[in-house]
Amino acid sequence: MTSMGTEKLPGTHSADEQFDDVVGFISIPDDTSVFIVVMHNDHRFCISVSESSLKGAPVQTMNEYLHLFSLLESDDSNAETGDPVEKMSDWVIAACLTQFATLAPPETKCQPQNLFDYFNPNTFSLELVIADGELTAVQIVEDMRNAPFLVPNITLSESIERLAENIPRVDPSEVKIDWTVPYYVVARPTKVFVGEEAYFFKPSPRGMDRHIGREIETLFRLRQSGLDVQINVPVLHGLVRYGDSAGISGLLLTYIEHRNTLADVLRSITPVSKDLKLKWHRQVIHMLSQLHAAGIVWGDAKTDNILVDYNDDLWLIDYGGGYTRGFVDESVAETLEGDLQGLSVLVDLLNS
């Protein structure tokens, strides 16, 4: 949450078999407005819409927008209602398809070679308005290229800065993107190189200061305790600078060669043997007990935060905290009790 409204993390949306990557989403209750940042064919679109920009809209159009906005404000999603951010994003993107096709046709697609280029693509600003009674996206003249909220950036607290003072800071232009790894739906940098060394790039989106700080602190404690060489957890190798400021745009972590998350493996149509499930059962219990013995709380315990490597061994990832309904209750989030609650769900899934 932000003081201005609601800022959400990204998702992916398809339109006519063309996948668009929503990399930023902000809603502002004061003027019932939404600001969305979408990547389409390696071009960035900054799209705004508000109740006032829809003045003169047909009743049905205005009601659709206000209903979707009310779902955002409820900050609730479930299997029946769906994700309100995705619903609003789909609605906005559908009105922008003509502009996408005109301003960023497939032949203009390019793959940025480093993080600096990825953070600074060709950028267009669009606004949803009503023209001749129809919902329409119009291009507006607005230089958004250097807007700070378009590039992942946070400022670390003084205490986290002290912990990270010996962690190398790397310029984004020095971080090369490996586009050969499979990206399934959309292409976001994950496997990157600094020199000859491969890393996993984890961006630090605006508004995620506490979560990134918690991740840095937890990874520091894992290394300090020696657990980083005793159990399968990532190591923090570097921080990606944000411009000339003291801020950062992301973390450079151990790149774990893996075949999928545990969540995806368990959802797969390919059955998992009882012996392998038993192995994973023992591994996750052992790793979590080691964390807790060192006084470390994992945080967001769930199958999406466990990787399965090519040796069929598990890795515990994501130490930014938070909770996921169905695994951990909000009331015990980021506590030992919450970890054990999440573990209970994990064990049930592995025993099913």
Image (spheres, helix red, strand yellow):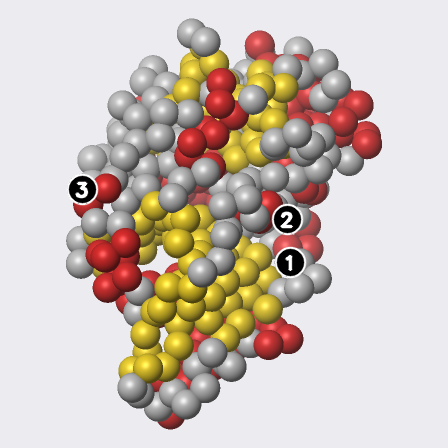
Q: Position of residue 32 (x, y in %)?
A: 55, 76
Secondary structure, mark 1, is loop
Mark 2 or mark 3, earlier in chain = 3
Mark 3 or mark 1, earlier in chain = 1
Q: What residue is rendered at 76% in x and 22% in y?
A: 163
Question: In which quarter of the view is residue 304 placed?
Answer: top left
Q: Residues within 10 Å of mark 2 (few under 14, many from 20)?
A: some
Q: CA distance from mark 1 to mark 2?
A: 7 Å
Q: Position of residue 52 (x, y in %)?
A: 51, 81
Question: In which quarter of the view is residue 81 placed?
Answer: bottom left
Secondary structure, mark 2, is loop
- Residue corresponding to mark 2: 207
Name the foreground residue: 64 vs 338. 64
In the image: residue 257, left or right of residue 291:
left
Looking at this view, name the residue that lies furthest to the top. Answer: 196
56 up-or-down from 218: above or below: below
Q: CA distance from mark 3 to mark 1?
A: 38 Å
Q: What residue is rendered at 56% in x and 22% in y?
A: 171
Circle 1/circle 2 CB separation < 8 Å: yes
Residue 1 is marked as: 1
Residue 64 is marked as: none
